[in-house]
Amino acid sequence: MTWSTKVGTATIAFQSDGQGTSGLGQTPLAPQIVNVSGNVFRLAAPNTIAAVNFGNVHVGDNVSQALTITNTAANDGFSEKLNAAFGGTSDARITTSGSISLLAPGATNNSSMVVGLNTANAGQVMGTATVNLQSDGTGTSGLGVTDLASQNVPVSGNIEANGNVFRLAQPSQHTPEPVNLGNVRIGSVAQQALTVSNLAPNDGFSEKLDASIGGATAGITAAGSFSLLPPGAPGNPAATDSTSLVVGINTATAGAKAGTATITLNSNGQGTSGLGITPLPSQTVNVSGNVFRLANPTLNTGAVTLAARVGDPLPSQALSVTNTSPDAFTEGLKATFGAAPAGFTTAGSLPNLGAGLTDAATLRVGLASTAAPGTTNGQVTLNFTSTGAGTTGAPDQGVGSANVALTGKVFTPAQAQVPGSVDFGIVHKGDVVAPKGVPVTNSAPVTALNDVLRGSLGPASHPAFSVLGSLPDLGPGQSSGALQVGLNTGSAGVFNATAAWSLRSHNADLPDLPIELVPLSLTGTVNNFADPAFRKSGGAGAFSRNGDLFLLEFGTLILGGNEVQGLLEVGNAATGPADLLDGTFEGAGLPFLLAGFDPFADLGAGAFLPLTVGFTPSALGDVLVELLLHPTGHNPGGFNAPLDDLTLRLHAHVIEQPEGVPAPGSLALVVAGLLAAWAAGRRRR
């Protein structure tokens, strides 16, 4: 018979039978085919379970053994699974426990079903333990549970109790537990001996104790053994060992160390029961400790430059020191100064700088004096010590030293010598005025070490002034005229302003020292030129101007009529500020009567003097008189120069009749005379 999937067909033949109905006999009909399939499963097949022979054992021994059970059915998908369970035993001293469910075809179980012996009493055991077996279709055929033939497994053993009965050695729990070795320094010895006793009674019927230690995990050390430790602790001092078994931590590297070691224990019948070696339960020793490396000093400040100016407070600077560490397992760092070199001072010490910390405030170096300028060089030593205070408690241990290069610089500050003011005096609107230099001097004496003078000027507080150029750095005793001030003459005015100094004493090692100075005073007057002019203030006549030619026209007058009088003014028509105006007149006024045409001086802007011109029409014809004004402009700044002459013409036409007109010949003479007079005036100018 084969176990597999079965597939096939069956044919059904059909006939129509007329018996009892039509009487036509049998007529064949179409056949039908039936498809048939199914799976054939074999039962589980247990192996023959081997007998169990425990041999000779002690009274009180813990004796057990697992059975090996295999489902030997083929694992081809058409075999059921195996169940196994204990039935009864033929001897009450045979113990059983466990069962097996759904053991797959081809699979083996050698742990679930256990037989043992009750060793409370001596004697020989020869019996069986029944194992009930079933084929289970769960998950395969689905045909349920089928009982299989049970097997009786032979079980035998000899529980020895003849003669003297010896108890096993009875080890105490080791002490100390756990073993904490605390904080230790790298490279030191960190160990602890364990104490173990044989607590079995010392009555002649107890075996002796053997022990060894090993199996240490990473970072832990374990060594040592003892044998034949007699029973009887605590009454028997020889029954305790406190030296042979030693655990420790590996101090080659820093860090937290934690792990275990194993004490292997045996009861030894040598010299007592003679029953040989019997293993006893082992004991686990938990060991821990912290290993600290020495302090690791790092000097972060290898060189210090201390700078000051003469008379400054004494400068000092802190050094930066780090106790370099990747973790917390580093001892504290001490640091102290060696002797201070000449010209320098030292202060402070580090008592205990923790792992990974930096101190940048405690250790200070300074200059001993700023009384004299110059440069001082030296070197100071820092001595480093690893201290166990607060960590391992180990004595201080030197961990080297480091040197700090020291440079001291004392500078003489720059001194500024500058003018207090710049005065452009009086210039004229539109003049091209050259900038005025502003000399600057560093008047400090030349010493061993000097600041330079640097900075700038301005800007001016008024836009009429401009500050030009830049000041180069000036050493002691050096001067510069690179700074200049310009004046804008685009508009007239009296200008006053200041320009603030921004001068500093400078060197490369110190912040600049501002130099307080009074701002530079800037003054300048831009004048308009004096502007001589005539103007009419009242009275008779028409007044007009054409450039430098002024005309007072009385027009046509009746012979014998009354005197007419024109009121004029002469003066300085400039707007202030302006030059002063002086003037003199040239020419006779007759037949015009003149008043006020006298020399004048110092007429300021907008100042005018009164002039009177009178005329009596006592003779027929045209009357033309031309007067010249010779003006001069000047100011307190030293300017004094003549200006263009002005011409004042006085004209009247006298007739007998109000409506009369002069003869053509007479009119031509008048025009010719006017042109000649005008040409003469131009030549004089």
Image (tube, grey):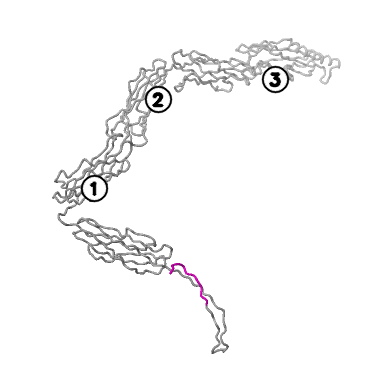
SS label for mark 2: loop
Q: Quadrant of residue 125?
A: bottom left
Residue occupying image coordinates x 57% and y 18% = 485
- The span picked out in magenta is 1-11
Image x and y of residue 482, in percent: 56, 17
Tell which tag, 1 or 3, sits nearer the viewer: 1
* Position above or below: 13 against 331: below
| Residue marked by disc 3 | 538
Query: Dots 1 and 3: beta carbons under 8 Å?
Result: no
| Residue marked by disc 2 | 302
| Residue marked by disc 1 | 265
* Position above or below: 176 against 131: above
Mark identifier at residue 494:
none
Circle 2 Cα neighbour tier, 10 Å, few/some/many (<14 / 14–19 / ≥20): few
Q: Amino acid at mark 2?
A: Gly
Give the number of marks: 3
